[in-house]
Structure formats: C-alpha cells, structure tokens
Image (cartoon, rainbow, N blue to C red):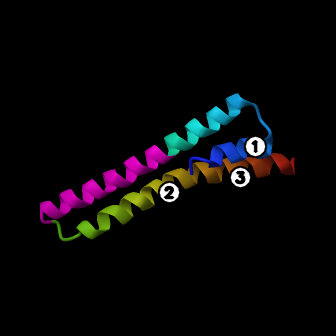
Amino acid sequence: MAFAPLLIALVLRRSFIWTIAFAVSFLLLGLALFELISGANEIQQAARREGCKDSQWAFPIFAATLTLISGRGWWRSGSRHQQRNRL
C-alpha cells in the first residue's frame, strides 16, 4: 500500500509534490480506516463486557453506517456528473 502513491505518480508522470501528496493521502486514509476498525472492535468488546446479548451486531452495524455515509456522497457526486453530461 505504501508504494501505490509512487506507482500512481509514475504512471501519471506528475511532479514530486504530487507524489508526496499521494503518499500522505494514502497514509492518512490507512490510518483512518485502522482507527475506525479498532473503534468498532472496542465498541463490540465493551458491549460484551456489559453483558449485551446483541454485541455481535456492533461491528456490522457500525460498518454498514460508515458504508452508507460514504456511499451517499459518492452516489450524489456521480449523479451530478451524469446530469452535467446530459446537458
């Protein structure tokens, strides 16, 4: 994953600044995903400690919520792009 920004920059033949920008964005994205997953695991473990019977649903609900939030923005931007192309 760490080499992906370098490969993208080489393929796109961008400047060194773009390479650094790609690398930083990929690292931040990886860190954010790691934090989200570890946070969901902590929620699930806390629910088990408290004796919740439905603790096995903590991670799937959390993941589904994140998917819907991120997917909604992607879908909207795509539909606007398609509308512009139709005009």
Helix, strand or loop for disc 2: helix
- How far apart marks 1 and 3 lie (CA) works out to 31 Å
Q: Residue 56 in magenta?
A: no
- How far apart marks 3 and 2 lie (CA) works out to 16 Å
Mark 1 crowdedness (10 Å alpha carbons): few <14, some 14-19, many ≥20? few
Q: Amino acid at mark 1?
A: Leu
Mark 2 crowdedness (10 Å alpha carbons): few <14, some 14-19, many ≥20? few
Q: Amino acid at mark 2?
A: Leu
Q: Is residue 49 left or right of residue 75?
A: left
Residue closest to the far left: 50
Q: In x, y percent, where is residue 46?
A: 19, 57
Q: In x, y percent, where is residue 81?
A: 76, 47
Residue closest to the far top: 17
Mark 3 crowdedness (10 Å alpha carbons): few <14, some 14-19, many ≥20? few
Magenta stretch: give its range: 30-51
Helix, strand or loop for disc 3: helix
Foreground: disc 2 or disc 1: 1
Q: Which residue is mark 1?
A: 10
Residue shown at 63%/33% (left/top)? 20
In the image, which disc is placed on residue 49?
Answer: none
Residue shown at 63%/54% (left/top)? 75
Q: Which residue is mark 3?
A: 79
Q: Which residue is mark 2?
A: 68
